[in-house]
Each structure stands twice: as structure tokens, then as C-alpha cells.
Image: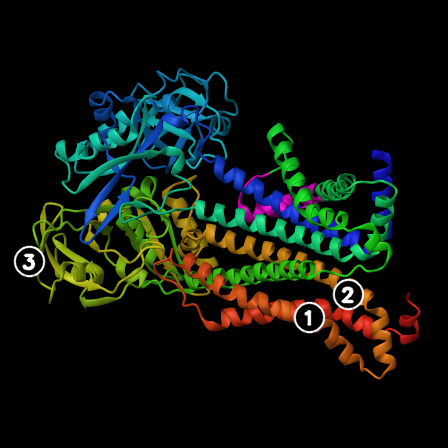
Amino acid sequence: MLRHNLLLIYRNFRRFKSTFFINLIGLSTGLACALLIFLWVKDELSVDRFHEKDAQLFQVMENLKSVGKINTTESTPGLLAESLLEEMPEVEYASPASWVDEYRISINDKSIKTTGQYVGKDYFNIFSYDLIYGDKDQVLTDKNAIAISESLATRLFSTKEDLIGKVIAFEKEKQFMITGVFKDVPDNSSTKFDFLLSYEEYKDTSPWVLDWRNNAHATYLILKRDTDIKEFNQKIADFVVRKGGEEHVTLFTKPYSDHYLYGKYENGIQAGGRVEYVKIFSVIALFILIIACINFMNLSTAKASQRIKEVAIKKVVGADRKTLIMQYMGESMLMGFLSLFVAVMIVQLFSPEFNEITGKQLELSFDKNLILSFLGITLFTGFIAGSYPALYLSGFGPVTILKGKLASSGSELLVRKGLVVFQFAVSLILIVSILVIYRQIQFVQTQHLGYDKDNILYFEMEGKVELNPETFLTEVKNISGIVNASSIGHSLVDGGYRSSTSTLQWEGKIPEDILETEYVRVNYEMIETLGIVIKEGRSYSPDFGSEDTKIIFNEAAIETMNMKDPIGKTVNVLGNDRQIIGVTKNFHFQSLYEEVKPLFFILRPEQTWIVMAKIAAGKGREAIKELGELYQSYNLGYPLEYKFMDEAYQDQYVAEQRISVLSRYFAGLAILISCLGLLGLAAFMAEKRTKEIGIRKTLGASEAGIVRLLSGEFFQLVLIAIVVALPLSFYFAKNWLNGFAYKIDLEWWYFIGAGLMTMLIALLTVSFQSVKAALMNPVESLRSE
């Protein structure tokens, strides 16, 4: 029986070649899209979840009450980890961790700049970063200990063996002894580093972290298995306040593995994050699969009239409905597995390009879980695609069929039309989404930030440059092609280290109001180098003598303080009185997801470590060459490692840029699959009405009239799809844009243009078959039956 059914399936595939190839292309393309998205989603969901104690691993967060809002941050006091370990019985292990930063490590004549952080002694008991050599309980107990990755070991020593006890130089001739070598951090870790140092060493070199009022670094905990998280959060909520820290700080914990996907907070409440993109692409994958299934269902039911006698004869000779359902379901399942085979080849072929777009290293590894997932998707697809045709074809009575009284039912036509409407409604929503995402990313990339980020390069001071910054800056300014140069505490755009304080006091301040304010340490001419506009007052200048007690605010800070005529007034911040000498116009020092926050500048040349240089347009190559030579004259053997500010700014939106590119590809494929189905239906309708077309042409109907006749029904369906999809696309677009503090307006032409594009694509698809049918010789048409 199985052999007989397979033979029938093969014959039907040969008999209806066009339908077979349309279904194969549509289903395989849909499955390939779904499989690629599945790999991407699986990778996203796996980030930070590889740690052995993931269920017990938590990160301590802070809610900071500021004027009118609550800011959520991962920064906590440096002493918090060890204090929680000592005082909270629920805590099994605890570790502080500095933010990952770049440092230079030297051994003999080798000098390598790489990334690392300071962590607590139990770091390897908390995180599952596998040690190849060393004891995880002892590796970081000594202040002068360092654990390095196997790749860093290979770069430094050309081996990873027999390194325990060897000494390497680190930053300003400080030496550390290697006590451990760990495997390279996995790709699905959100934190990347090549070495770890003891936090006890950090306490010695940076004693300010011992102050409970300084929120400097992250705190990670392993909680005991029976811990009630809600009760634990209540216990630690005012822990910092009890220790003499800032009164506006409230602590809570969140699972560490939620950090990557659920990193967005609004007014102290978790409000999404990258998980939104996971949801979006999961829905896109589902819709693309549904569209491919719809094509199969539509074409299969449309071809029913050409297979209906086969059903009748089988029923007459004794076949029951169950047997027929199994046959047609088997046909759809076989089509599904053929499509899966083609889809796997497509995925293998396009994986390198997909990885380049997503910035990942995804590959088809045929493990048990992946195989079961693929088989599940294929069976689901085959079942959905084949269920309606199987039930539809097997439901006809043999007497009705053989008497020729079979007619298409209204419900059948309604279902078929509804499916076409659904396909093109989804396609239209995807087109609008692409347009809105593209326009928003373009807006972000071209938005004036309130300062000039173009043609500005920056780099960290090292070695003799750090020892002689003013001399170095003077020489930089003398380079031909350098317009200006100065130094700053942080780069503003790369999301690295930032400074903030809630110590600001001013005349007229309500005592209970606490203002969380960002601050930037700058050198002379830094504000001018960035092109930040002074709205009132002046910038820092040596012409006015000592400027150490002066301060410059942005507009947002002045407005939040509700201060009138601020120039000349005195505020107290960071424990010192400072006179306001200037107010800058607002500028974006964070991403456009955030509104401009209060900020002030203080003059601290000795606490700046990033050099920024403004290069004249068209002089970049020569200026960078001279700058590199100057840098080498200070630090022989140290290459000048710089970034351009505009490129670093764009990196803040790399996720959105990737989403934009992926959306274009997947939306294009969804439209292609929809059009394939429409093309097949149009071809079938033209074939079914061949004799009617011949009679109409014989009676004088024009070819244009025939095209209108055949295209009109599909035109109406696409028009209905547009009416259904436009309000939905508006809702989805508006919801996505709400994630940005600064965003584009939703113009009417986005939706009308997308509707017209969908209409044009559909009409071109249908017209191809309509014109072909209209041009057929009427004599040939009348002989077609």
C-alpha cells in the first residue's frame, strides 16, 4: 500500500509540474527562513545561560531616585559583595567585578593590549569559565595574582602549558604572577575578557571604591537553592543606606542570565530589551511559514477539480475517507521533507552571509535537539499545509462527482480568498516595518547630536604620553591637518565608563529632591574641540586664572534645578563649592533611546585619559600618519590604536542596523513566496477559464479587457489586504518607535506608499499570466478541452 501511494504521489508530482515546483520553492524558502531565524533565536536565548549555577546566579541592581524619575543601574558599591556574603545567610558566593576595560600587558619584548577586569576571589565559583590550570578556590586569593585566557597565553608565550608562576608586567611596570589559565570565554557570553585580576589589588590602587557612597562596579551572587528571592530583595533593599551610602539607593537582584535579553528598565521597572527582537523575528518566521503553507493549500485546493475523478474512482472501488486523507497528507508530508532537504542546502549556502549580517557564528550542527526541532517544524508545516487539501478532496461524494454536478462551494472560495488576503496583509505589514526601521536608523545616524562627531578621532593615553599629557597635546595641535586637540575623562559615545553623582546642592533646592547628574572631566579646549555650543556664559580658559572651582552645566540640568540666571551662582557638588561660568546647549551623550539627562563639566586635566583630535576635512591620511609617528616617538613599539567618534556612535545602534538588514531580506522573501502563490493561482485560473477566454475573444473582447477580467478578482483581494493591514502596521510601527526617546514621525506616505507597492507587485505577478492567457489564439483556446 505504501509503495502504491508513493507511486501515485510521484505521478501527481510529474503531472502537475508547475504546481510542484511552486510549492517546492515556496515551502523550501519558507523553511530556510524559519531555520535561519531558529538558529539566531536559539543563539540569542542561550546567551549567558551556560553557567552551571545559572538558576542561583544573580546580579545586584540599584534603583536611584532622581528628580521625577527612577534610574536603574548595574553599578553598586565596591564593598557590597563581601558585606552581603558576611551578613546575609542566603548568599553562598559573592564577587564584585569592575567593568571590562583595555589594558596593556608586557612580557619580554612583547606588548599586547587586551581586555580584563578586577574580580573577587570566588569569581570562578560563581561563573562557569573553565580553568585549564589552577585551582578555582585559590587562583585569585593573592593580590598579585592574574588568570589569563588560553588565547592570551598563546599570544604572549606561544603556549598555554607550564605558565603557573610566571610573571608578566602590567600597566606602569606593576608585575603580576600567573596563577591560572582558563578556556577562552564562550561566544554566547555577554562579557568578554582575556584576563582577571584580584579585586583586593584594585582596593589598594583605587581606595575610593571603599566608600559606600561610590557606586562603581557590578556585584554578582550565588544564592542558596531554597532562597525566596522576593524576601531576599526586601532584606537588601536598604542595605546601602544602612551602611552609610546614598539615601536614594534601593537594591534588588535579577537573574544574571536575564541581563542580555531583559536589560531595559523604565522608571525602575523592567521594560524589555533585546528580547523584543527575538519575539519579532519569531513572529516573522511563523508568518513566513504560514504564507508558504497557504500557497500549498491554495494551489492544492485549486487543482482539486483536476484530481476529483481520481477521488471518485477510489471511493467506488472501496477506498474510505481515512485512506484518502492519509494519501494526501502523505503527499504534503513528502513535499515537506523534500522542501526541508532543499532548505538545509539553502541554509548551508547562505550561512556565511547570514553570520556576517548578524555578527554571530551560527552553523547547522546536527545534534539530537536540532534534528528533533527541524523534524518538528517540517511535520508541523506538512500537517498544516496538507490538512485542508486532504480533508477537502476526501470529502466529495462519488455519485456527485461522476454525474458532473460538482461545483465550487462558497466556503471553499471564501477560505481561498481569505488566505490570499492574509498573505498580502502580512507582506504589507513587513514592507511598512522595513520602511519605518530604515527611516528611524537613518534619522539616528544623521541626527545632529549637539556636538560635532565627524572627523574626530580619539585614543587612550599610554606610557610616556600619560606622563606628559600637556606636552603631547601641544605637539598634536602643531600637526598639519589637526584643527584642535584636548583630553577628556570618557569618550561620550562608546558606552564605556561614566561618572555620575547625586551630591549636587543648589540655592532653592527642595531638601528631599535628589538629582542624579552625569559629569565629565575635561581639559582646556575640550568643549571647543567637540563643537559643543555655549548657550550662556563661557567655556574654560587659562586666560581667567585658576578654573578648578568653576563648573559648566547643560540646559537639562539648569531646567531640572529650575534655576534662573545661573551664571555666577554657586552650587556645591562632590563636596566643593563651584561657581557656574557657563551653560551649554543640550547634546546627546547617550543613545537616542534616552532623553538628554542633566550633566556638568569640571576642569580636571590630571583626571583625563582620552585624547580627542579634530582633523580638517580631507587631511585625514596625512594627519593620522604624523600623529602615529609622534605617538611612536613617545611610546616606542606602541602602535597608535584609535577610533573615529562617528563610527563609535554608529556602533551603539549595531543591533538596529542588523535588524533593519534582516527585516529587508525576510520581508522580501515573504513577498516572493506570496507572489509565487499568486502566480500559481493566476495560472490555474487562466487555465480553468481558457475556453471562456476563447469565446470572449471570438465575440470581440479585447485583450486589455481579458486582462482586466482575469486580474480584477485578485486586485480586489489585495485591496482588502491593504485595508486590513494598514491600521495593524501603524500600531506595530508606533509601538516599536516608542522605544526611542527621539524618533521620526509616522508620515502618511509610509503607509500609502507601502500599499501601492504591494498592489503593484501583486498586479505585475497576476498580469504576467493574464496577458499570457489574453494573447492566446482563440482557436487554440476552444480546442483546449
Depth order, front residue of 617/630: 617
Instruction: Point out the frontmost of discs 3 and 2.
Output: 2
3 or 70, which lies in front? 3
Rendered image: mark on residue 108 = none
Report the span colored magenta.
Answer: 343-362
User: Marks 2 and 1, how far apart in space?
Assistant: 11 Å
Q: Up-down: is 691 above or below 577? A: below
**Residue matched to label 2:** 685
User: Quick check: is 348 in the magenta stretch?
Assistant: yes
Which amino acid, by three-letter code, is at mark 2? Met
Amino acid type at image mark 1 = Glu
The residue carrying pointer 3 sits among few (fewer than 14), some (14 to 19) or many (20 or more) residues within 10 Å by Cα, namely: few
Q: Position of residue 406 (x, y in %)?
A: 80, 59
Residue 686: horizontal and vertical position, in percent? 79, 67
Q: In front: mark 1 or mark 3? A: 1
Chief secondary structure of the magenta portion = helix
Label 2, secondary structure: give it: helix
**Label 1, label 3: how far apart the Cα atoms are:** 72 Å
Q: Give the mark nearest the N terminus, 2 or 1.
A: 2
Residue 713's disc number: 1
Q: Residue at x 36, y 61 (%)?
A: 742
As drawn, is 378 to the left or to the right of 551?
right
Q: Answer yes or no: do the residues labelled 2 and 1 have beta carbons within 8 Å? A: yes
Quadrant assignment, res 304: bottom right
Please tell me the numbered disc located at residue 508: 3
Residue located at (48% from left, 38% from top) = 45
**Could you say whether the residue bearing mark 1 is in a helix, strand or loop?**
helix
Q: Circle 1: is it few (<14), some (14-19), or many (20+) Cα within 10 Å?
A: few
- Mark 1 or mark 3, which has the lower sequence index? 3
Q: As displayed, is residue 325 above or below residue 510?
A: above
